[in-house]
Amino acid sequence: MRLWIASVISNFGDGLSTVAYPWLASAVTRDPILIAGVGLVRFLPWLVFTLPAGVLTDRYDRKRLVALMDSLRFFVTLAVALTIVPFQASLSSPEEIASGAADPPTGATALLIALYVSALLFGMAEVLRDNSAQTLLPSIVDKSQLERANGRLWSAEMVMNTFIGPPLAGPLLAVAFALPFFVDAGSFAVAAGLIFTIGGRATPRPATEARGRMRDELKEGFGWLWRHLFLRRLAILLGLTNGFTNLAFAVFVLFAQEVLNLGPVGFGLIGTGFAIGGILGGLGGAKVSEKLGPGSAILGTLGVVAVASILTGLTSSAVLVWALGVGQGFASTVWNVVTVSLRQQIIPDRLLGRVNSGYRFFGWGMMPIGIGLGGVLTDVLETTVSREVGLRAPWIVSGVAHLVLLWWAWSRVNTRTITEARSSVETQPVTQSTPD
């Protein structure tokens, strides 16, 4: 319960930051590459730090790592808030930003540097924190209840991260640009305090067990993942999905301001559609998996995201984008409930941190690449065709790419292959397989 409450509180702060960070970036610059760069730097640690983080997760108390990383995120976010304060008066109003007519504020370079540095540090803490939290859950919840527990965690995350936090960020930004960051920092402080109060230790190996070199331990975990044909396919599929999804979202703040004509409050509210879908997916993900089969649930996710992305790129209606977000939120959360629970059931506990980190190296490492490509695609099309085409095209490209991924996954990631993967845990160790 304390882990769940800590997740609720910290994700409320995250919900504020999902609006506050990009809106602040758009107040400093209108360059799509520079705005996408903030997201790229934020997710870059998933590409370069994920594997070492997995070794740390399997070496040290996972509970303590979660608390320490929440503490670090508190200090980083507080530093950003304090950096904004001296420049508060020079930042443009939300209405001027939305119109695109605002001049660069005083200290724009300093604010951009602060955003980039904080995004990098925040991302590194997030990598270790999330990997530790995900591997901590099986030590608290019985394996038979993992889908239900993950569903409740994902539902709480969706509610706070996209349903409650973002709509409140707009009014807070209207009062002061720094205010959402102060609130966000406070949420991390409270979350860290709650985790610190959880008794016991969550160390996967006895303290007396000898530790090998980090390189050898990393190789052991990554090798286990690579030899597991199904999990390797699933990790690569997730990576491509996340890459193309983030290609579309790279400059979403500009899309919302200039195509959907939204201010900060509307920008916060647009995410509530995704949240509603996420809540439904979190609460019903286990039932969907049971009714349709886990493979069909995963394939359905790809189809829903493909259609929603294409329609988003073609419309100028904020209401339609909101409704499409309901479908995307539902599908994405069902994916998480099914696949996270599956990994927790299949991977041995002593390797869970390292194998999870290898999985996320593929799954999340593509996110900064997708963000970077999205910014470049928008910039190129803005120069050669028009600004509007540049803001719409990433969504259509993402949707078409997801249709291709659906075709590839149809015979490789389905209920039959998932059943075989689960059965292999009960029969024999995973053997070497040929790359596919």
Image (spheres, helix red, strand yellow):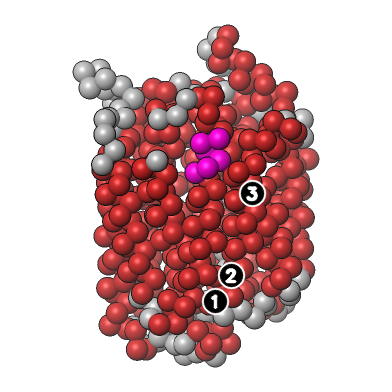
Q: Residues within 10 Å of mark 2 (few under 14, many from 20)?
A: many
Can residue 238 be seen here? The reply is no
In the displayed structure, does residue 42 sit left or right of residue 158? left
Quadrant of image for the N terminus: top left
Q: Are marks 1 and 2 in contact (CB under 8 Å)?
A: yes
Residue 187's x, y, as percent? Answer: 35, 59
Q: Secondary structure at mark 1?
A: helix
Per the rendered image, the range of residues in magenta is 148-153
- Mark 2, residue position: 269
Q: Secondary structure at mark 2?
A: helix
| Amino acid type assigned to the residue bearing label 1 in the image | Val
Residue at image mark 3? 280
Q: Tell me residue 161's x, y (percent).
A: 50, 58
In the figure, residue 249 lies in which quadrant? bottom right
Give me the C-alpha separation between circle 3 and circle 2: 18 Å
Of the image marks 3 and 2, the number of the one nearer the N terminus: 2
Q: Residue at left 38%, top 38%? A: 132
Disc on the earlier residue, 1 or 3: 1
Specify whether residue 185 is painted magenta: no
Of circles 1 and 3, which is in front?
Answer: 3
| C-alpha separation, residue under disc 1 versus residue under disc 3 | 24 Å
CB contact under 8 Å: marks 1 and 3: no
Can you identify the residue that label 1 sits on?
Answer: 265
Secondary structure predominantly adopted by residues drawn in magenta: helix
Q: Amino acid at mark 2?
A: Leu
Disc on res. 348: none
Q: Mark 3: which amino acid?
A: Leu
Is 387 in front, or is 186?
A: 186
Residue drawn 27% across and 46% down? Answer: 68
Q: Is residue 415 left or right of residue 350?
A: right
